[in-house]
Image (cartoon, coloured by chain):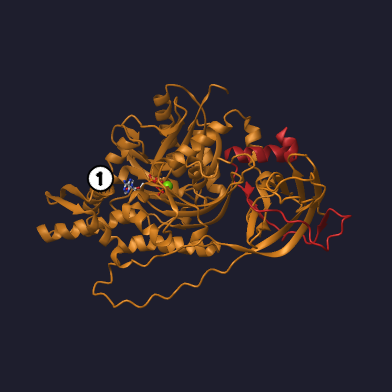
Chain colours: A orange, B red
Amino acid sequence: MSDSVVIGINFGVTNSSIGILGKNGHFSVIANADGDRMIPNAIGFSDEEEFCGSQAAHQVVRNPKNTLQAFRNYLGKSFTEISVPSDAAHPDMISKDGAPAYKVEFKGKEHIVTVPEAASKQLKHIHEEAEAYLGSKIAGAVLAVPVYFTDKQREELRKAATAAGINVLQIIQEPVAAALAYNFGQEVAKNDAQDKTALVLDMGATSFDITILNSRNGIYTVLETAHDVTIGGESFDQELVKFVAAEFKKKTKIDVANNKKSLLKIKTSVEITKKNLSRTPNAPCSVESVAEGMDYHATIARMRMELMCNKLYAKCNELINHVLEKAKITAGAIDEILLVGGATRMPKFQNRLRDIFPETLIRTDVESDEAIAIGCAAQASLIAGFEKEDIEASTKEAVTVTPHTVKPIGVVGSKGEFITIIPDHTPLPVKRVFEFGNAEEGQAAVYFALFEGEQDPLPVKEEKPAKPAKENDDDDSEEEEEDEIVVAKPTYHQTTQLAEVVLAGLPAGAKAGSLKIEATVQVDVTNKVTITLREKSSGKQVRAQSA
Amino acid sequence: MVLDFLLPSPPKSWSADKTSAFHAGITAPTKAAIQPVGRHFLAHARRHIHSRTFSEDEK
Ligand SMILES: Nc1ncnc2c1ncn2[C@@H]1O[C@H](COP(=O)(O)OP(=O)(O)OP(=O)(O)O)[C@@H](O)[C@H]1O
Ligand SMILES: [Mg+2]
């Protein structure tokens, strides 16, 4: 499969995107025939034809009963498990053999489309867009799913993709794909251990997904996740819809609060306004013929939007704090924040992260809504040369489920400080090589002691003096948060001594600093610890292994 | 990784005829799934499937 083309597919609830490896050696997301990089997951039916993607999304206001959207939410679920909105703004859904299916009107007749069929149609459309862009057949694709997807949901996606003519190389997890796109913890220099923890924040249109991801020598382990379907880009749209509807009522005395069609029109417009507000402090909002032939035209200020969405931003931070608590880790233990999903572009969302993480690196060097597709493309390129059976074998539990250390293992420095060599949550087997800068003048033997450690208690937070109550307690604007928040990196202290090793017979008469001692610590899957000390100039070494 | 502190000489009580002593095993590890992505994972999978050790893998 050497010159075969492989792609990454991000099949979201709202949008899909296609990642490829470009001629320049960089991964990127391609545009479809309509010029959109985010292809709306929508299927439209009319009297004449059936269409997918951008075209279908455009007809939703005109023809909502025959426009299918958000079908990924229903994949792998039974009809009784889902709650379906049944109103003028959504297509009718029925149970077909216990599974959810859409009832639409197509070419003047009733037409049933099951959820897997809908997913398959959309995936076929995406695949065709990609082949048209690349001008060649596609040999295979890697797809991503949320971490909370069940085996049944994954299986139904795999079937839908296969039915669409896609050769599914692998299905990976969304935050993990994003981490690959950000190249998080992947550049591990030889003999230089890299241990990093990322907080992956993915806010798409319909949910906010948080993942704490560890990288140990470039291998990822998911530490904790949280998921809230009540926060997402659309919940911000809804606040704007309420605002516009109220303004419209003030101006025209027409109440559209219960008019689904008017609300749908407003929603389509305010989403554009919201996106523009991520770039500019003011943005126009225009809705043609909201109701009774009356238009709405206004300019909305970003500050205005931020005020009306204050509770939503606060909810985002609450969920982040919740997941940190669940994982029992502190904000200071997060090395990088990886932003994923279109809605994390909102400036206020990013600013509010500083309330919890004043110093942490917030990565925005990959377009947030492209990260998943790019990560899938990177994984696809990586495994393109392998036989399918080998890829499958490598994802079996026998390979992926492995023991992880519970406590950090390290040495104690000259000032009594605990220096981590193998951190907690490190998958086994592990091998770490490090070097002690020098030895003392005339030192004949060196002594190496290995310990397990435990995290030091966090400094007690000082109680802030109570502030005088403000009149408008809805607005906790930044200005009042002047106190320096210091989030320290966690530190450790030694607890149990594991081993002592001595390397004697060092070259005599060596000056201070002229000898370098290389130490190798390995822990295998049966918890056996092996320590090797080697003096680099003479090659003299000692090797010791636990029972 | 280079650590910039000296390894001390062995304590006085250390008997010259031994080179090592093991005192305790590490705290019992927990099982968890690693993510099957990226080139570092592929190296892990290769080691696992072919039951190779780290040093064999480096050859
Ligand atoms: N520049 C922007 N500013 C604010 N919001 C944006 C911006 N760009 C996109 N969005 C919002 O991001 C959301 C879509 O994000 P994304 O494409 O990641 O969703 P998705 O993954 O398909 O949805 P979901 O995560 O629900 O499956 C929409 O609500 C959209 O309005
Ligand atoms: Mg998403």
Front one among A103 and A157: A157
Give x and y (percent) for residue A17. Answer: 41, 37
User: Which chain is indicated by disc 1?
Assistant: A
Identify the element where label 1 is drawn: loop
Q: Quadrant of the N terminus of chain A?
A: top right
Can residue A85 be seen at all in this image of the molecule?
no
Q: Which residue is under mark 1? A: A61
Residue at image coords 45%, 60%: A320
Q: Quadrant of the C terminus of chain A?
A: bottom right
Position of A105 relative to A225 (above/below): above
Q: Residue furthest right?
A: B17
Q: Amino acid at mark 1?
A: Val
The number of discs equals 1
Q: Locate residue B27 relative to residue A225 in the image: left or right.
A: right
Q: Residue at x 65, y 63 (%)?
A: A416
A301, A271: nearer the viewer: A301
Between residues B33 and A491, which one lies in front from this camera angle? A491
Is residue A328 at least partly visible in the picture?
A: yes
Residue A182 percent across, percent down from the top left: 47, 42
Residue at the spot x=63%, y=61% of the render?
Answer: A417
Q: Is residue A14 above or below residue A24?
A: below
Q: Position of residue A546 (x, y in %)?
A: 81, 54
Quadrant in the picture for residue B53: top right
